[in-house]
Amino acid sequence: MSVVIIGGHDRMVCQYKKICRQYQCKAKIFTQMAGNLKEQIGSPDLIVLFTNTVSHKMVKCAVAEAEKNHTDIVRSHTSSQTALGEILQKACANKNS
């Protein structure tokens, strides 16, 4: 399963990748707004928005891409390892059932 994480803390990128690998997910992580974010998102299976640490511009871009590609979006106010683990656990369970 492919996952795009929008937001979060710069220092947590390695932990986010490690958690995604534990759930056999390929991950792209964007903690800062890139100029070509729209093209870099692609068409993942899931977009995770950490709403506490993300700009409104990044949210709008991610939501627009998700709607265009019919991608599921999960919003989380906290950008912790536990929050990401719970999101991926639910997403993988839903995908397998």
Image: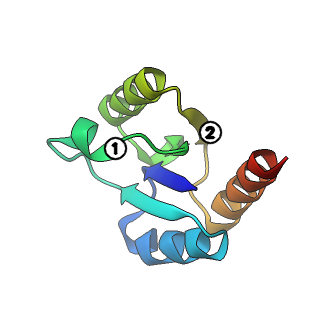
Query: Measured along the vertical axis of the image, is residue 81 above or below residue 96?
Result: below
In the rendered image, the vertical position of residue 96 relative to residue 41, given as above or below: below
Q: Are marks 2 and 1 in contact (CB under 8 Å)?
A: no
Give the residue type at disc 1.
Ile
Q: Quadrant of the N terminus?
A: bottom right
Q: Which residue lies at the image location 65% right of the left edge and 76% below the top edge?
A: 22
State the residue in front, 84 or 66: 66
Q: Which mark is residue 29?
A: none
Q: Nearer the viewer, residue 24 or 58?
A: 24
Colour pattern of the rendering? rainbow
Crowding near the residue tagged with mark 1, few <14, some 14–19, many ≥20 C-alpha atoms within 10 Å: many
Residue 32 in the image: state x and y as whole percent. Answer: 28, 52
Which residue: 53% across, 33% down?
71
Q: Position of residue 33 (x, y in %)?
A: 25, 45
Tell me what residue is drawn at x 51 percent, y 40 percent: 51
Q: Secondary structure at mark 2?
A: strand
Q: Which mark is residue 74?
A: 2
User: Quadrant location of residue 41?
Assistant: top left
Pointer 2: residues within 10 angstroms few (<14), some, or many (20+)?
A: some
Residue 20 place in picture, x, y as percent = 57, 68
Q: CA distance from mark 2 to mark 1?
A: 15 Å
Q: Which residue is mark 1?
A: 41
Task: Please give left or right for residue 24 compared with residue 50 in the image.
Answer: right
Q: Secondary structure at mark 1?
A: helix
Q: Nearer the viewer, mark 2 or mark 1?
A: 1
Front residue of 89/86: it is 89
Residue type pointed to by label 2: Val
Provide residue 69's location: percent of width, then percent of height. Answer: 44, 28
